[in-house]
């Protein structure tokens, strides 16, 4: 399968999901190229952006699992090729 490069934006509004998000990102570390996380204390949310390099299936599995977590919103943008 062809690999694609992309960015995944994650917004965590439920503090109880932070540990689950981190565990999921660790379990997909083979496709994570870089990560930046910002705790936005004034708004009581955490914003995480990750750069990924993987197949559609791998990236879809990661974003799907993240999206099913309580209080977590996920959006992704991937290269065409």
Image (cartoon, rainbow, N blue to C red):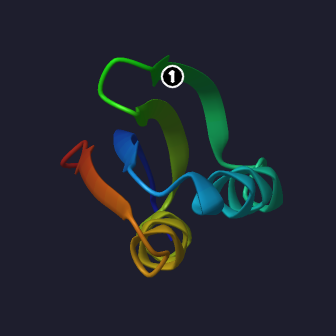
Query: Which of these two is toward me, 36 or 6?
Result: 36
Query: Which of these two is toward me, 14 or 35?
Result: 14
Residue found 39% across the figure and 46% down from its top: 10
Residue 48 coordinates in the image, percent (x, y): 47, 33
Query: Which of these two is toward me, 73 or 32?
Result: 73
Residue found 27% across the figure and 50% down from its top: 76
Classify residue 60 by image quadrant.
bottom left
Residue found 56% across the figure and 69% down from its top: 58
Classify residue 28 by image quadrant.
bottom right
Residue 79 coordinates in the image, percent (x, y): 24, 42
- Tell me how many marks there are: 1
Residue 75 coordinates in the image, percent (x, y): 25, 53
Residue 4 coordinates in the image, percent (x, y): 40, 49
Q: Is residue 27 above or below residue 46?
A: below
Residue topped by disc 1: 39
Q: Is residue 69 left or right of residue 13?
A: right
Q: Is residue 27 left or right of residue 52?
A: right
Q: Secondary structure at mark 1?
A: strand
Residue found 45% across the figure and 75% down from its top: 70
Q: Is residue 53 above or below residue 47?
A: below
């Amino acid at each position: 399968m062809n690999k694609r490069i992309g960015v995944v934006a994650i917004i965590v509004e439920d503090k109880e999901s932070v540990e689950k998000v981190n565990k999921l990102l660790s379990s997909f570390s083979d496709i994570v190229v870089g990560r930046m996380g910002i705790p936005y204390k004034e708004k009581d949310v955490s914003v995480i952006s990750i750069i990924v390099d993987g197949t559609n299936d791998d990236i879809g599995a990661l974003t799907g699992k993240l999206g099913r977590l309580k209080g977590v919103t996920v959006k992704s943008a991937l290269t065409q090729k």
